[in-house]
Image: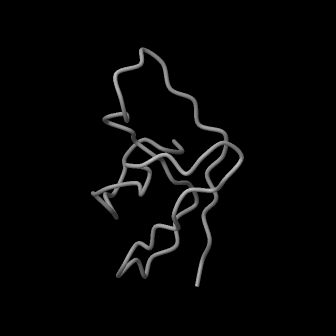
Amino acid sequence: MLGSSWTLIYNGSSGLDTDPGRYNDGKVQYIPNNAIWYTSYRILTTSKRGNDTAVQYGEVSLFGN
């Protein structure tokens, strides 16, 4: 089954601790020592910036070396 188990490859800040501004990209976040290519990736968000009751993410891009 696709996505039945996951391997943690990064645990840290997304780089969006500060607001990059509307229509601007956030910082590129490098994931060191990831030599294995997976067929699927899961992004798990555990906190949000500020005290608002909602959050919206427009897009996540994953690039390989």
Left or right of 46 in this view: 2: right
Q: Is residue 45 above or below residue 52?
A: below
Left or right of 33 in this view: 65: right
Image quadrant in which you'd find residue 36: bottom left
Which residue appears at 31% of the width and 36% of the height? 46
Residue 58 x %, y %: 66, 39
Left or right of 65 in this view: 14: left
Which residue appears at 40% of the width and 54% of the height? 14
Q: Is residue 49 above or below residue 27?
A: above
Q: How is the image coloured?
A: secondary structure
Residue 40 x %, y %: 56, 54
Which residue appears at 66% of the width and 46% of the height? 59
Farthest residue to the left: give it: 11
Residue 38 x %, y %: 52, 65
Q: How many marks?
A: 0
Q: Quadrant of the C terminus?
A: bottom right
In the image, 54 versus 24, the foreground residue is 24
Which residue appears at 37% of the width and 46% of the height? 5
In the image, 19 versus 32, the foreground residue is 19
In the image, 65 versus 35, the foreground residue is 65
Farthest residue to the top: give it: 53
Farthest residue to the front: give it: 21
Q: Is residue 37 above or below residue 19?
A: below
